[in-house]
Image (spheres, coloured by chain):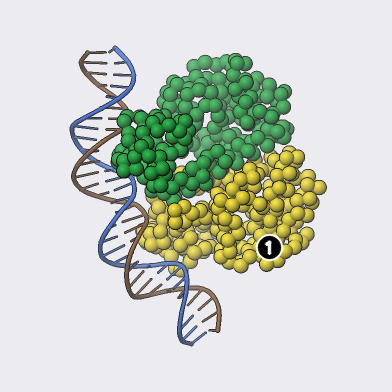
Chain colours: A yellow, B green, C blue, D brown
DNA sequence: TCACGTTCTTGATCTGCATCAAGACTCTCG
DNA sequence: CGAGAGTCTTGATGCAGATCAAGAACGTGA
């Protein structure tokens, strides 16, 4: 575990839309109060229900956001660098609604929530950037809600693969970036059912070899999946 | 259909947290560009996928936000006075992710999105109020996601009834405020299954007479439902 | 390289819930 | 008030997906 924060990270953080227009002295002040830590895999960073002491920025690695209730657990989202997570709880000084766990060795910058809120109170550019960030987050979760309610698990997998393919450069062969059981949980199904669902997409040209996915005929898969930007485009 | 806007509505709108701290001349300017319309029941106000021309404020009545995909439709939320809906799309100048339909005769104030965005750009208090609103909206949808993924439909109904009871003043007898088929859709189930689920809650003291719900033993129901503020408290 | 632990796949079975159908009930309008 | 349309309930059946179990496959560490 490393404590300390080097100025070499500043440009990457500054380039995030959330911080890009913030007044320079506000940004400096925020960075002065920041910590950086490197965590090994499978470490719980925050726990659902706890008060929100820090805004987190993932600089490298990846993080699983998950939730629990009555002995059940479900994957809510996966966070990749470079991005923040749990912004709303920070701004509202509220409890975390999700826990976070590292999926692999990860470097995380921790900004004290009090500092973030203080700057939010006085920096209009920052407040506006938070609006944009929260609007995207909100719309993204609405899309997940629609996915869950309007599609079967097979349809959700098909559309997930199309999104992942697009994100992986658009080639006919690409890699799943985390364990299948986590993907199953994210899509709201069991690992057993995920295995079966992959087979269910075989007639649409999808083949699976370990973590490698191949799509034989993208248009055939799209005809089945019926992707909609109102559900599948998480950038707007 | 009425066009025209009377100053008697101003205090109610001004009292909304979204507008309460806005500079007075900005508020006046916004109100000058506003329209008010009264719609009968079952009228589609906005359509999923359309560009977002107005921020809507419901002054009376109620509105169903719903989404469609591949011939399926689902209820996403119900909006009651006095509140805004579809704020994120307004601010982002993006497409609506949901459609909206009046459930009963409703009076709606329409604020041109351009006007809203222009004031957002220059009024720090307004920007901060939008942050608070979006953070609540975001956290609310995360809670819905958790409800859908972590609970069975029976558990979702039980917790919904506990929330509704609390909202209805806490008495042992209270009214459903909209049609059962809509409630079923909101909870992610069919109307048939909702009927059955009400019967399934009979052993926990729940009885149904038309739209009237009675809870015989609230603690017994809570022992079954296991409410969690991290899922069921939509105010934080 | 091998052993062990974990993840994934596959099969069998079960369960929660949807679909279909029809009757009962409620509400609205002339 | 009565008719008709729409909603709700109930029963039967089907289906999507979970659960349980066990073997296969994979990854990691000594």
Indicate the position of residue B165 as horizontal and vertical percent values.
Answer: 44, 34
Indicate the position of residue D20 as horizontal and vertical percent values.
Answer: 33, 64
**Which residue is nearer to you in this view: A55 or A127?**
A55
Above-or-below relation of A113 to B39: below
Q: Is residue A45 left or right of residue A205?
A: right
Q: Please report the residue visible at 41 percent of the width from the left and 56 percent of the height from the top.
A: A189
**Which residue is nearer to you in this view: B32 or A116?**
A116
Q: Chain of mark 1?
A: A
**Which residue is nearer to you in this view: D15 or B145?**
B145
| Quadrant holding the C terminus of chain A | top right
Above-or-below relation of D6 to D22: above
Q: Quadrant of residue A103?
A: bottom right
Q: Please report the residue visible at 72 percent of the width from the left and 27 percent of the height from the top.
A: B23
| Quadrant holding the N terminus of chain A | bottom right
Q: Is residue B142 left or right of residue A222?
A: right
User: Mark 1 sits on what residue?
Assistant: A37
Q: Look at the image and tell me whether residue A202 can be seen.
A: no
Q: Please report the residue visible at 69 percent of the width from the left and 28 percent of the height from the top.
A: B22
Q: The residue tagged with tag 1: helix, strand or loop?
A: strand
**Which residue is nearer to you in this view: B161 or B29?**
B161
Above-or-below relation of B164 to A221: above
Indicate the position of residue A168 as horizontal and vertical percent values.
Answer: 55, 59
Q: Please report the residue visible at 58 percent of the width from the left and 64 percent of the height from the top.
A: A43
């Amino acid at each position: 575990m490393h404590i300390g924060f080097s100025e070499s990270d500043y440009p990457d953080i500054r380039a995030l839309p959330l911080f890009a227009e913030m007044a320079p002295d506000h940004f400096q002040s925020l960075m002065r109060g920041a910590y950086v830590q490197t965590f090994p895999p499978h470490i719980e960073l925050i726990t659902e229900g706890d008060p929100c002491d820090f805004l987190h920025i993932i600089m490298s690695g990846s993080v699983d956001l998950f939730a629990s209730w009555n002995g059940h657990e479900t994957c809510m989202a996966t966070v990749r660098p470079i991005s923040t997570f749990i912004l709303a709880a920070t701004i509202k000084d509220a409890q975390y609604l999700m826990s976070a766990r590292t999926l692999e060795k990860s470097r995380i910058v921790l900004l004290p929530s009090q500092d973030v809120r203080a700057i939010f109170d006085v920096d209009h550019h920052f407040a506006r950037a938070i609006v944009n960030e929260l609007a995207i987050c909100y719309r993204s979760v609405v899309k997940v809600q629609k996915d869950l309610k309007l599609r079967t698990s097979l349809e959700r997998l098909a559309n997930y693969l199309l999104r992942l393919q697009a994100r992986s450069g658009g080639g006919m062969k690409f890699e799943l970036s985390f364990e299948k059981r986590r993907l199953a949980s994210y899509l709201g199904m069991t690992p057993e059912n995920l295995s079966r669902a992959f087979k269910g997409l075989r007639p649409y040209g999808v083949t699976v070899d370990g973590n490698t996915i191949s799509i034989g005929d993208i248009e055939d898969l799209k005809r089945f999946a019926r992707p909609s930007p109102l559900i599948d485009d998480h950038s707007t």
